[in-house]
Amino acid sequence: MKVSIFITCLSDAIYPQVGEAMARLLARQGIKLHFPEAQTCCGQPAFNSGYWDEARASARTLLEAFDDSDFVVSPSGSCTGMIQHYYPTLFKDDPVMLKKVHQFCGKTYEFSQFLVNVLGVTDVGAHFPHKVTYHPSCHGSRLLGIKEEPRQLLANVRGLELVDLPFAEDCCGFGGTFAVKMSDISGAMVEEKAQHVLETEAEVLVGMDMGCLMNIGGRLRYEGRPVRVMHLAELLYEGVKQEV
Amino acid sequence: MSKQGEDIIRQLDDQAAQKEEQFFAHIANRLNRPRITRAPAHPFRGAPDFWHAYDLSEEKRIELFMANWTSMGGNAQRFSDIVSLRTYIEDMAKTMKAKYMIRFDHPLLNEMNVEQNLPDVEMTVWNEQAQEELLTKAAGADIGIAVVDYAIAHTGTVVAVSGAKQGRSVSLLPTVFIAVLRAHDIKTKMGEVMADLTRRFGTKLPAGIHFISGPSRSADIENDLTIGVHGPGIVHALILD
Amino acid sequence: MSTTFNPTTTIKERARISLNDEFLRNAVKYTTEKLRTSKKLASDELGNWEEWRERARQIRLHTIAHLDYYLSEFVKNARANGVHVHFASTAREAVDITLKIAEAKGAKSVVKSKSMVSEELHINHRLEEIGVEAIETDLGEYIIQLAGETPSHIIIPAIHKNKQQVADLFSEEAGETLPPETPILAGFARAKLREKFLEADIGMTGCNFAIAETGSMVLFSNEGNARMVSTVPKTQITYMGMERIIPSLEDLEVMATMLPRAATGQKLTVYMSAITGPRRPDDSDGPEEMHIIILDNGRSSQLGDPEFQEVLNCIRCGACLNACPVYRHVGGHTYGWVYSGPIGAVLTPRLNQDTEKWGEVAYASSLCGACYEACPVKIPLHDMLVYIRRQKVEEGHTPASERMAFKGFKYIMSNHRRFKRTVNLGRTGQKVVVRDGVITSKIGPLKGWTEYRYAPSLAEHSFRDSWRNLYAELEGSTPDMSSDVMKRLEEAKKKQGGRRHE
């Protein structure tokens, strides 16, 4: 069984530790991840901005890279949502590619989905004695329907105190190019989201999307707040690292 | 209307008659198919199937109706006989120092004859004879009394049907509106009212069927709730067992 | 803020103005939160919300797919009850018909209950131009009419006005100073508008739903003004969007269950009136003459377009506005036209059939999908916004710099070696602006970002650069896959073909 990682352009270039955490956590389950290097980006920035030819060019690298994989696991609800929800639309006029797309969609999973729904793992044996709050990214929860999986994983982390984030489902304002194109509105949204995070008095903000976390983390840092921002995989790995 | 006015309206009607087919044909065109002139299969009609099973006993219906009606700011009372209902209305009129009242020309209200014990009140009965004045009388009335055809427990609603002897203004223009209803006319859900209306009238419904769920309200000024904006600010549902 | 539906500013400029209006932001936030919470309570109380939603959607889809049939049935049945039915393909035609009716009746004044369609027509201005007074009777609409403004929310049009502002407007109208107290202000409006109801020549309404089988029109209101307007004046004119139709009275139960709960969390609006024609010969109230003007104005252009036909499902509840985080921060005037929020962002470019002028509204969204989740008839608004953006690109209306940027994107992302090289270049180049692991400088292409937050720097080593070492390390230390895990993977693989996505 070939289990591959779709690292996403963001994690590849800016947050490689997320991919590393994923690889190490899955290794503990006896899974040797593969990294097909032909992959670049899911194409979402271009797709959302209406540049579909450009999006397709990027998407093709994924279809090529993962052609012979049995499972594709990604640390991003947003990118996985792009694949599941929009690749069929993107390639609807190309019957040959469309067939590949359907196959690809069938084998692609967001990280917490893979752990919980495929491997049946809700307890990775982590110990992380901190106050934590969770931001469910929009695409992950609305497009992919990921509601329970991250919570189940967090619930089983020893010592972890999970505090509810007020208005958790409200968008953080990232929206990819939206953050730059409609910067004032995006700024207002992330300011509000950061405020809610601070209301929880949590030490750590955890999520399943580096786009959101980069956005909220960037705002918290801008305000000089010492809240640590981590991807779920990072948190779980740090939680097991000490146990070794 | 002047002759000129009539001509203009007639012209507009002719214009519409000419434009009609083209308007519909354009729709069919956009939908990429020929015009449909026969009723299509209508599989998703009305409420979802599970809803039909929702049915309460008469007692529960009355209870639910009263709870919903009062939660919206209405007053609800039950009476076991017509005399106590009449007395209730009399007391209300006296307390309010009502001068003008208006009511349906309805057998139940005629039997009740509430105006009999209210000599200081001018009571207008809604009948076809007094057409011109009725609206003015309703506008000036302190209390309007109607017998409503149905009530709906699920939403806390009374349903008034308009007709020659039951003007819609009676439930709209006075300051206080009293809806008299019989307990057995309270249905669990709206669909039952729809079904009965269809049974009674087919597709030729009366000109006005009014579903009323409490006193008039608005939150348009800074989200502040205010009662009694255009319609009656005080409403009573008087249920006769 | 806005007095016109023809803005000369960009949406970004309007957004900036709204974002600086603290009262507006607080008012919109408070109201949308209240409505959102109320909707949740009401839908939980109803139970089986998803099943009701699906039924509502199916009824609307079915009706729109057979719109020619249901509309013609409606027209036939309405006429049989004595209604004059008119057809207007454009706003201009609807205005002409209205003015002719007003002329024919020698009308001096018109009282209106809420009609978004009438806003599309600017009918108040057109009537004033021929000397006919047009008075809004919905309290919120009355307030903004006095202020000379446009509505900023579909359900609560004067959300942006505070009590003092309302008191000032009413005081001017009253000729005396009224205090900023709701009961007094509402009392003034009630008395003032009652006069108007009683003396008006024409009552003008919108149409929440038209029922094909009976030729009836249904109005939902809380204040009672829609009932007043359709009871007192001798002539009634009703504007009906051509898609606002349902097949039968039975289907009305579904719409009556969804609309009030989605809009304000009520079980039912205080008044729901099913009006079937003008007064009968022996009725003593109700209009003597009734006109229904069926308006197209861009709606038929959505038919037959698989990407947009579903937007005609809309029942104008405003739930998407209340769910939208963008709307919550900027309010309705930012959108620039009659309809605001997510539905407005789609309808404005589509009904106006002008992506060049109005396409920018579709960018005021982070595509979070909250609108779709909130919509009682399941319109995929979040998808439609992307389709509109794509249209804008295809029609060549996007800025050259943006087109260049995405050409660059395509070049880099279509080949992993180019991607790797670009990241390496970036890593070197960023040294100029990176301090302490972050980029904060507010110049250059990242300005929009760094104005509000820090930007991260590119990692010292990208994931793909470090992979070989990581893989080698894990090779040696990974335990063999257990048979349990293998079994799970095999199970999952079998189910992969059936993983459908909506």
Image (spheres, coloured by chain):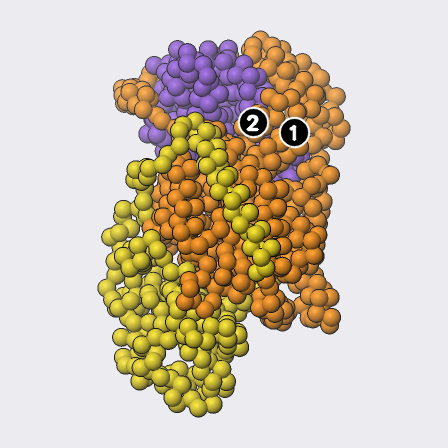
Chain colours: A purple, B yellow, C orange
Q: Which mark is residue A48?
A: 2
Q: Residue flagged by tag 1: what amino acid is it?
A: Glu
Q: Residues within 10 Å of mark 2 (few under 14, many from 20)?
A: many
User: Residue C339 appears at what percent x and percent y?
Assistant: 58, 44
- Is residue B233 shown to the viewer in this render? no
The answer to whether residue A28 is left or right of residue B5 is left
- Is residue B113 shown to the viewer in this render? yes
Tell me which residue sits at (70%, 41%) in the image: C7
User: Residue A70 appears at what percent x and percent y?
Assistant: 36, 16
Share a chain, discs 2 and 1? no
The answer to which of C108 and A123 lies nearer the viewer is C108
Find the distance from the CA under tag 2 to the CA under tag 1.
18 Å
Classify the position of the C terminus of chain A by image quarter.
top left
Label pair 2/1, CB-CB below 8 angstroms: no
Q: Residues within 10 Å of mark 1 (few under 14, many from 20)?
A: some
Q: Name above or below for residue C125 compared with residue C243.
A: below
The answer to which of C498 and C156 lies nearer the viewer is C156
Tell me which residue sits at (70%, 69%) in the image: C174
User: Residue C443 appears at what percent x and percent y?
Assistant: 76, 28
Q: Name above or below for residue C369 compared with residue B83.
A: above
Please identify the quarter of the rendering in which residue C496 is found. top left
Q: Which mark is residue A72?
A: none
The answer to which of A18 and C163 lies nearer the viewer is C163
The answer to whether residue C45 is left or right of residue C178 is left
Circle 2 SS class: helix
Tell me which residue sits at (56%, 12%) in the image: C414
The answer to whether residue C224 is left or right of residue C428 is left
**Chain that bears disc 2:** A
Kindly identify which residue carries mark 1. Answer: C356
Circle 1 SS class: helix
**Chain that bears disc 1:** C
